[in-house]
């Protein structure tokens, strides 16, 4: 089982050279080098150049690098996509995706640009149409043009703007959309990361929302400030007790007398094969986190 931790996914403005440099030292699992919302119109070209140069220079270690481009309908989108394809980060994050065809268009353009197959597509789920079409968007991963699709990124601020839903503790107005997107992602083998928490000085509220996102089934959370990285990593890492219990379940199912059984008893508790599958993923993610050092 090959798993890449995506607990903490930190936005870094592509127009800020110091931020791009600092990102090399932060314990984030992934970095979104942003050309879109975090960059003023008069800095778009500068940001594009700096992000491409930062990727070429390297030095980011195990951190996954994702470039968020501007939408193709904007004056900067096509040039962003071309530059990102040439820079070949781990993934390209596409904003305002609302249909499976939106994913397919990006896939065809990347193919035309001879972009390496290792470069995946991540999509922002941030429009009302995206919520209605979540399953269809995820299904693009099963098509030839959309096979690069790897991850959903929840854009909760834009969702609040477009739907007029309020961002309140517990996010009850968005619970249905969050769950729908998790189900759609899992149906097609995609990862999914939660939206940002805006009040970065409110660490208690942030911790609560991280726990909430994990309970929804998210793989991690997008972040807007470096101080959010470590508590986010902690929230989305399996607890030591979880890992120990998972190992006991795996070991029990591996015993000769239990092979082929659909359910067994471990320390007085009934566990099924589905629990063994969950246990193997828990151990795999723990090992992948430990391997990061």
Image (cartoon, helix red, strand yellow):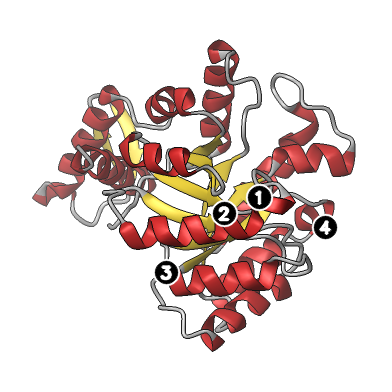
Lower sequence index among marks 2 and 3: 2
- Report the residue that reaches farthest toward the left: 256
User: Where is residue 143 shown, x and y percent of the image?
Assistant: 58, 80
User: In this rendering, would 278 be left or right of 39?
Assistant: left
Say above or below: 123 vs 268.
Answer: below
Q: Quadrant of residue 93?
A: bottom right
Spatial CA distance of label 4 from label 3 is 29 Å
In this view, the mark in front (4 or 3): 3
Which label sits on residue 88? Answer: 3
Secondary structure, mark 1, is: helix
Say above or below: 121 vs 156.
Answer: below
Residue labelled with disc 1: 181
Lower sequence index among marks 1 and 2: 2
Which label sits on residue 129? Answer: 4
Residue labelled with disc 2: 47
User: In this rendering, would 215 be left or right of 94?
Assistant: left
In this view, the mark in front (1 or 3): 3
Label 3 Cα crowd, 10 Å radius (few <14 / some 14-19 / many 20+): many
User: Where is residue 263 shown, x and y percent of the image?
Assistant: 32, 44
Say above or below: 271 vs 260.
Answer: above
């Amino acid at each position: 089982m090959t798993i890449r931790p995506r607990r903490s996914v930190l936005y870094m403005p592509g127009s800020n050279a110091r931020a791009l440099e600092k990102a090399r030292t932060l314990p984030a699992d992934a970095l979104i080098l942003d050309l879109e919302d975090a960059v003023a119109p008069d800095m778009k070209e500068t940001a594009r150049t700096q992000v491409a140069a930062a990727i070429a220079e390297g030095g980011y270690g195990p951190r996954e690098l994702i470039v968020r481009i501007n939408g193709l309908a904007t004056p900067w989108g096509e040039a962003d996509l071309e530059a990102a394809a040439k820079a070949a980060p781990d993934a390209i994050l596409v904003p305002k995706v609302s249909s499976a065809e939106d994913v397919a268009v990006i896939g065809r353009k990347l193919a035309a640009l001879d972009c390496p197959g290792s470069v995946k597509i991540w999509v922002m789920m941030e429009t009302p149409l995206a919520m209605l079409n979540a399953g269809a968007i995820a299904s693009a991963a099963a098509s030839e043009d959309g096979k690069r699709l790897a991850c959903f990124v929840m854009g909760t601020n834009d969702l609040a703007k477009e739907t007029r839903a309020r961002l309140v503790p517990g996010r009850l107005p968005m619970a249905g959309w969050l769950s729908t997107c998790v189900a759609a992602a899992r149906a097609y083998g995609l990862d999914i990361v939660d939206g940002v928490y805006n009040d970065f000085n409110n660490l208690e509220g942030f911790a609560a929302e991280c726990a909430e996102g994990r309970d929804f089934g998210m793989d991690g959370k997008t972040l807007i400030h470096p101080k959010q990285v470590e508590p986010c990593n902690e929230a989305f890492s399996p607890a030591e007790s979880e890992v120990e219990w998972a190992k006991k379940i795996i070991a029990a199912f591996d015993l000769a007398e239990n092979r082929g059984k659909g359910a067994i008893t471990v320390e007085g508790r009934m566990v099924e094969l589905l629990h063994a599958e969950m246990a193997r993923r828990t151990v795999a993610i723990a090992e992948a986190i430990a391997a990061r050092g």
